[in-house]
Amino acid sequence: MNGIKVDINHLKKGEVNLGTSIMAVNFKDGVILGADSRTTTGSYIANRVTDKLTQIHDTIYCCRSGSAADTQAVADMVKYHLQIYSAQLPPNEKPTTQIAANVFQEICYNNKEHLTAGIICAGYDAKNGGSVYSIPIGGSIHKQEYAIAGSGSTFIYGWCNENYKPQMEKDDCVQFIKTALSEAIKWDGSSGGVIRMVILTKSGVERLIFYPEEYQK
Amino acid sequence: MPGLGFDNYQRNQFLSAKGFGQPMATSTGTTIVGCKFKDGVVIAADTRATAGSIVADKNCEKLHQLAPKIWCAGAGTAADTEMVTQLIASNLELHALAQNRQPRVITALTMLKQHLFQYQGHLGAYLIVAGVDPTGAHLLSVQAHGSTDIGKYQSLGSGSLAAMAVLETNFKEDMTKEEAMKLCANAIESGIWNDLGSGSNVDLCVMEVGKDAELYRNYLTPNVRAEKARSYKFARGTTAVLRESVKNILDIEETVINFTSTADAMEVDA
Amino acid sequence: MTNATVASEYSAEVNHVPIEHRFNPYSDNGGTVLGIAGEDFAVLAGDTRQVEGYSIHSRYQPKVFNVGDDIIMTANGFAADGAALIDRFKNQLKWYKFDHGGKKLSIQSAARYIQHLLYGKRFFPYYVYTIIAGLDENGKGAVYSYDPVGSYEREQCRAGGAAASLIMPFLDNQVNFKNQFEPGTDGKQKKELRYLSLDEVLELVKDAFSSATERHIYVGDGLEILIVTKDGVRTEYYPLKRD
């Protein structure tokens, strides 16, 4: 089985594609997700300020790559499942990142023939702190300390492997993601625009945005 | 079994192989745009519909009503944009009635994207959805496969590149209604002149918070038909009369009633 | 190719269509042309829009040319082939003069020569519909039209290119009076043929092009008409709609 070949055959004509650079990294106080903001149809940039970091629950987010339509539909389904699930939980309890990631995995695996979706699910919960799950195209699931995905990620495997440190400080982690994504954007034609980040900790959600004139230095 | 049947798929494959392809659908090789302003949103469209390289309709309507204050502009397959828009308009009204609330733009968008996703891109509808609701003014877009985008200005269709060039250079935050109308009209005009799939006139719709939506049908008409140099009236009798038959489909009867009455006047009171 | 993971009902269709990587040497640059012969004149008109797909390459790219010896020529379809064909003919006409002491080439000789230019590329044709116009040896207007591989015919009028199918029936009716009968003869007697005046022809050409512009997306921007009379070749230009 050749994953790439299958992927190319599967992309429908004129489909909006998230040729993407996305990542999520655990750090001392939780987890940070990062993404570029480019959406393309062929060679045309259909949206240069896309938000690929999608909220699934209060402090659970996902990074989407692949088909825009497929990943949005899957994210909407998971969001719906978690709403129903959390309503049945005792008060003050929230779904864990693991639960969310497993719902993603289930949907991606069961519908693998119709989906082009590469998802990173990351979140903060009181029980486990920050956690990162990667759900690549076939519908498998991988718990990782950090995850990178999308077409731009191929260019930064080496750099990330060399420079990742466990339990980073928040500022160091932001800098790590910013540098990694700016390299991915630099080398990958279908990634670009601004760098968006979401920081998930016990104190909630914080959003960051970095413009090209800053991250390109 | 409810839903679509694919029984004819095999037959169509066979027919295609024999050289009988699918009939061509009227496509609105189109320019459509939308743009937010200080307290509302404007959408606009050109009015050309094409079938291949022939202009099928010189003044078609690409602005559709989803709800009184939610409108959308459609590009792609004309029939799909029209039908999908009518279906969602109906469901949106039922939903608003059931909830006893004003319909929201996000509701319309969610219904559209879920419907289009179900059809996996086979419904060729590309829509810019805009409107005002209790949560404010909104501008969104949906693509045939079911993906959606948010933005302060958007363009779709074959003329979207020409239109986006205008939007990217001239868009400002917090424009007045008039500025936004002008910007949208300019963006559409750019499509009309530079994209062969777009042409004729500009239609425009303004939705402002707290006000009724205003539709400006043929807001600009920069392509009035040129007057002909010659008259093409044919002298009576130029065409031969091959057969003539007159059928009596009604028998007329006339009865004259004389009203110079000698009858008694009506008794009013005894 | 492995087909292990894509096993949907219609996946076979995807795998059986090979992706073609061959270079396509031709393209369609749109535009339309029209030639009419009168009693002592001939006109050849063409719009000045050049396109590819949904894009306009030029709003003023002339495609009707005075090639010399009071012959006007156009080759409509694939613009590069059209230009190449006309260049080749002009060049050959120059050499004809060198070789024959400046002798004037008659329109029927030009017509036959162009047939050979076209047929010479029988298996890699010039992708064009060619029309030439001029005056014959009796001073009467002449229009010759060709298919891409050189089959040709002398005609009273001919439309070619993108909107040919829109204009040709109009010409049949207005120039050759097809489907028109003398009033009062109950369709027994066809309307009598007569030569149209230059003014009438020019009006017909303008109306044909403004109407084609309305309904065909590859036609528009400008109309350039070349007119051949005993006094030589003259050019007129009229703007067309630009949408």
Image (spheres, grey):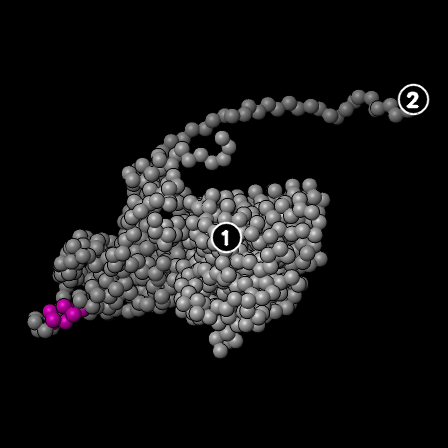
The chain ID associated with circle 2 is B
For this rendering, which residue is in front, C212 or B153? B153
| Mark 1 secondary-structure assignment | helix
Q: Kindly report the secondary structure that dominates the magenta region of the rendered protein.
A: helix
- What amino acid is labelled 1 in the image? Thr
For this rendering, which residue is in front, B117 or B46? B117
| Residue at the farthest right position | B270
Residue A73 appears in the rendering: no
For this rendering, which residue is in front, C63 or B80? B80
- Tell me how far mark 2 sits from mark 1, CA to CA: 90 Å
Q: Where is residue B46 in the image (x, y as percent from the top left)?
A: 50, 57
Please tell me if label 2 and label 1 are on a single chain.
Answer: no
Q: Residue B270 carries which label?
A: 2
Judge whether residue A59 is colored magenta.
Answer: no
**Of discs 2 and 1, which sits in the foreground?**
1
Position of A89 with respect to C54 (left or right) is: right
For this rendering, which residue is in front, B205 or A2? A2
- The answer to whether residue A149 is above or below residue C17 is below
The chain ID associated with circle 1 is A
Q: Residue at x 34, y 51 (%)?
A: A2
Residue C5 appears in the rendering: yes
- What amino acid is labelled 2 in the image? Ala
Task: Please tell me how crowded label 2 is: few (under 14), some (14-19), or many (20+) other residues with Cα within 10 Å.
Answer: few
Judge whether residue C92 is colored magenta.
Answer: yes
Q: What stretch is highlighted in magenta?
A: C90-97
Q: Residue A71 carries which label?
A: 1
Q: Where is residue C19 in the image (x, y as percent from the top left)?
A: 29, 52
